[in-house]
Image (cartoon, rainbow, N blue to C red):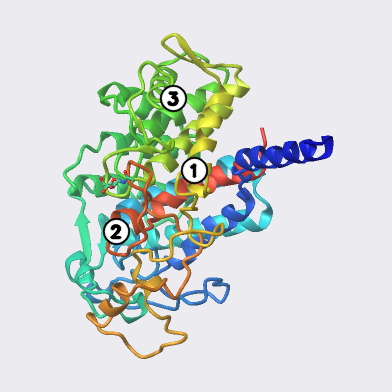
């Protein structure tokens, strides 16, 4: 073997090794950010504005609330169906707003504008849902009749029942629409929604009070959290049905930013973090072999996005306060928390065993047969004729990709062994939800343009 062919072999080996290590393409976080926000336009209910960018969607559910004499048009369809579930919608809205508050400096003005518009689309609807004193509308649409049909939102002829709860404890609200009153209505709203589910509501009460404090800076809301925190059971979860982790991190951040580095909230936030960090002796979550956080719930992807969001926002306050988290004999510094959060985001964007993106329209391979009525049926733009309840099943069972791209939608995701079957029938894997995307907006904003 001459010198030159030896060099050639080295070169080839080098290329092979280089290729082997360069499979991790740096994700285009800015592109993913734009798409993650655009997704919310595809979920819009009501009269769409002229600025609507996802143009295969049109006006829908224009008589919501008609039967009860209240305008309940607007808001978001929760997932791949056409029901408006206000409880998860409230979580989605709060976390979208938190993303905007926390990461505004990382977003360019256009994307920040789109994010605020996405928040407003929900809050305008919540104002309608709370416009009658002591009455709160909690849901529009009948899940049983809706789920029995495979219909575009624009065609819906299923029951649009408006579900309401009435307060037995009339508040002292006036009709003045000052911002605090509006916020108070949301708080009340969140609490009543929790009650109707016969759920433990203490975390929602504290969560609402924490945000009321942030919005109004009134001491009474802070005191409410402080005085009731002890009655809260320690639960290391965060999601639309559980606000514990969010309360710990929110309160810890407020105090860290005021120079208070040792308090009960911080201890809880640290224990929450230690339940996530893979090397922590008190780790409580499971990671798939490919590195994704997995919990046994319907749609898994909500866990990695919500948990990573908290890790990221907490890491920034820890970093400013020069603090680390001590998990037994292991130290998790702010950089480590960001690395974990980034690992989850990168997994979603394609750094995973399937080598595919779980965000529709991002990357070269992504889910094409998502469990989503509007996306899977021909758009009213190309097929204006009405599809009846059962007409859609042909499209549900189709082996072809969905005709309309619900750009930015992140699906429920792979099985615990990192495999993914792109099938509409498997809704746990292939259905997108608004509460998967909301925390991702903040994460993508930060990783696209990290600002201290
Ligand atoms: C992944 O898990 C599913 C469900 O348990 C199973 O059917 C499938 O065979 C597994 N695939 C691999 C590659 O292990």
Residue 316 appearing in the image: yes
- Mark 3, Cα crowd under 10 Å, few <14 / some 14-19 / many 20+, is many
Crowd around label 1: few <14 · some 14–19 · many ≥20 (10 Å): many
For label 2, the residue is: 427
Circle 3 SS class:
loop
Indicate yes or no: mark 2 CB to ligand 1 under 8 Å. no
* Quadrant in the picture for residue 95: top left
- CA–CA distance in space, label 3 to label 1: 16 Å
> Where residue 338 sits: x, y (%)?
55, 31
Query: Left or right: 291 with respect to 140?
Result: right
Indicate the position of residue 293 as horizontal and vertical percent values: 39, 36
Residue under numbered circle 3: 277
Circle 3/circle 1 CB separation < 8 Å: no
**Sequence-wise, which precedes: disc 3 or disc 1?**
3
Q: Name the residue nearer the viewer: 110 or 28.
A: 28
Q: Is residue 196 above or below residue 378?
A: above
């Amino acid at each position: 073997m001459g010198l030159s062919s030896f060099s050639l072999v080295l070169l080839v080996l080098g290329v092979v090794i280089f290729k082997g290590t360069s499979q991790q393409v740096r994700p285009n976080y800015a592109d993913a950010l734009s798409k993650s926000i655009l997704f919310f336009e595809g979920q819009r209910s009501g009269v769409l504005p002229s600025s609507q960018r996802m143009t295969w969607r049109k006006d829908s559910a224009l008589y919501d609330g008609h039967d009860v004499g209240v305008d309940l048009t607007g808001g978001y369809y929760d997932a791949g169906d056409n029901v408006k579930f206000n409880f998860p919608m409230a979580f989605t809205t709060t976390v979208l707003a938190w993303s905007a508050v926390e990461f505004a400096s990382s977003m360019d003005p256009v994307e920040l504008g789109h994010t605020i518009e996405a928040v407003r689309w929900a809050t305008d609807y919540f104002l309608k849902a709370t416009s009658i004193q002591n009455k709160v509308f909690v849901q529009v649409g009948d899940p049983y009749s809706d789920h029995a049909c495979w219909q575009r939102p624009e065609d819906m002829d299923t029951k649009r029942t408006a579900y309401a709860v009435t307060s037995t404890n009339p508040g002292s609200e006036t009709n003045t629409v000052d911002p605090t009153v509006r916020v108070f209505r949301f708080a009340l709203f969140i609490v009543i929604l929790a009650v109707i589910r016969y759920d433990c509501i203490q975390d929602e009460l504290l969560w609402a009070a924490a945000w009321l404090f942030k919005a109004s800076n009134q001491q009474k809301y802070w005191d409410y959290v402080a005085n009731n925190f002890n009655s809260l059971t320690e639960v290391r979860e965060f999601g639309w049905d559980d606000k514990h982790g969010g309360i710990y991190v929110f309160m810890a951040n407020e105090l860290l930013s005021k120079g208070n580095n040792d308090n009960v909230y911080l201890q809880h936030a640290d224990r929450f973090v230690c339940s996530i960090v893979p090397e922590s002796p008190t780790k409580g979550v499971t990671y798939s072999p490919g590195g994704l956080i997995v919990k046994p719930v319907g749609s898994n992807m909500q866990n990695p996005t919500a948990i990573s969001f908290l890790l990221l926002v907490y890491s920034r306050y820890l970093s400013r306060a020069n603090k680390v988290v001590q998990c037994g004999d292991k130290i998790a510094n702010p950089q480590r928390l960001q690395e974990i959060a980034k690992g989850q985001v990168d997994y979603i964007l394609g750094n995973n065993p399937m080598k595919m993106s779980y965000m529709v329209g991002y990357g070269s391979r992504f889910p094409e047969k998502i469990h989503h009525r509007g996306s899977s049926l021909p758009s009213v733009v190309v097929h204006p004729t009405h599809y009846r309840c059962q007409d859609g099943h042909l499209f549900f069972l189709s082996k072809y990709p969905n005709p309309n791209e619900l750009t930015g939608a992140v699906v429920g995701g792979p099985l615990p062994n990192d495999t993914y079957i792109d099938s509409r029938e498997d809704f746990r894997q292939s259905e997108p939800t608004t509460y998967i995307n909301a925390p991702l907006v903040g994460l993508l904003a930060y990783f696209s343009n990290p600002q201290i």
